[in-house]
Amino acid sequence: MIRFLSIRLLQAIPVLIVMSMITFVIIQAPPGDYADYIRSQMITQGNATTAAADIAAAQYREQHGLNDPMVIQYLRWVGGIVLHGDFGHSFYYNKPVSEVVGERLPRTLLLALACHFFASLFGITFGILAATRQYSWTDTILSFVSFLGMTIPRFLLALIILYVLAFKLNVQELGSFYSSRYGGQPYWLGFLDFNWAKLWNLIEHVWPVVFIATLGGLAYNMRVMRGNLLDTLNQQYVETARAKGLPEHRVIMRHAVPNALHPLVAYQGVILPYMLTGEIEVAIVFSLATVGPAIVGSMGLGDVYVTATLLLVLGATLIIGNIIADLLLAVLDPRIRVGSD
C-alpha cells in the first residue's frame, strides 16, 4: 500500500508541472494586464490625463516585471513556489497570494466537503432504495429527482433561489457567511469560536450553496449506485445467497451493496472536484467570499498570480481526489490491496 501511494504521488508531480504551464499560458493569453486596469481606473476617476495614465501603467509594468517574457514570469512564479513557498504578490489585494488563498480556500473546501458528504450519503441511500424497488413509485420519484439534479444548471438554480430570497422573501444580508452582528466573514467560518446560535446563523446563509451543489452530486451518485446495484443483484453469487435462505436485506447489504460500491468509490475521484466546482459556481452567484469570486475577479483585473495559484490548487484537488479514491478502493477490495503490495 505504501509503495502504491508513493508511486501515485510521484506520478502527480509531472502532472502538476504541466498543469501549471497550461494554466499560466491560458490566463496570459487575453490581451491586457493589471497595469491596464490601473490606467483605466486613473482615467475613469479623472485622477490623471491619458498620457499620465500611460506613463503610470508603463512604470507599474516595469516595477513588477510585467514586461518580461511569459517564460520568465512563469519561471519566477514556479521558482518562488519551489524554493521559498512564495506564490507571488497579489496586485489587487496588495498582499501575498498565500494570504488570499489562505483566507478563501478553507471556506471553499469545507463547503465542498459538506456538499460531498451529503451527496454521497443521500445519493447512495436513494440509489439502494431505487434499485431494490425497481419500477415502483419510489423508483420513479427518485429517478425524477435525479433527472432534475443532472439537467438543471447549477448557476440557473442559484439565480432562481437568489431571486426568491431577495425579492419575494426580502431576505437581508445575502452574500456573507454570517449576519453583521457576527462579523460577516470570519476566518475558517468561525468554527474556532463555535456556538449553536452562530452555527444556525451560518446555516441560514450557506444552505443555498450546500443544497444546490449537493443536488447535482446526489443525482450522479444515485444513478451510478442504482445501475451498479441492479447489475450486481443479477449476479450468480447473489442468487446463491438467496438460495441458501439468507434474508433479503442481508443479501443486499452484505453481498450486493459492497460489490456495487466499487465503481462508485472509483467515481469519487471525479465527483469531489465536481462538488468543488459546483460550490464555486453557486458562490459566484451569491458573492460569497470563497475561491469562485476571487478567480473571476482576478481574471477580470489581470491579477495573474492569484488566478494561477487558485486554478493550480483546484487542479490539484482532482489529483488528490483520484488518489483518495484509489486508496478507498484498495481498502474495500482485498484483491487490489494484494496487487498494490
Image (cartoon, helix red, strand yellow):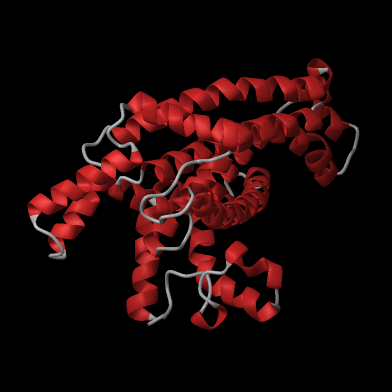
Q: Quadrant of the C terminus?
A: top right
Q: Left or right: where does residue 259 sit relative to residue 65? A: right
The residue drawn where x is 41% and y is 49% is 90
**Residue 17: percent from left, percent from top:** 51, 24
Percent from the top left, x then y, of residue 110? 61, 55
Residue 281: x and y in percent read 42, 52
Q: Quadrant of residue 321?
A: top right
Residue 1 seen: no
**In screen coordinates, is 321 left or right of 246?**
left
Q: Nearer the viewer, residue 202 or 153?
A: 202
Reply above or below: 172 against 267: below
> In this image, 234 relative to 337: left or right?
left
- The residue shown at (59%, 65%) is 187
The answer to whether one can see residue 336 in this image is yes
Position of residue 220 relative to residue 267, above or below, is: below
Q: In what quadrant of the picture does the N terminus appear? A: top right
- Residue drawn at x 64%, y 74% is 199
Q: How many marks?
A: 0
Please tell me which residue is depicted at 54% across the width and 54% down the height of the picture: 108
Name the side, left or right, on which 48 lies relative to 263: left
Depth check, front residue: 242 or 88 = 88
x and y percentages locating residue 146 in the rendered image: 51, 49
Give residue 307's quadrant in the image. Answer: top left
Give whichever of 261, 129 is nearer the camera: 261
- Residue placed most toward the observer, 188 or 149: 188
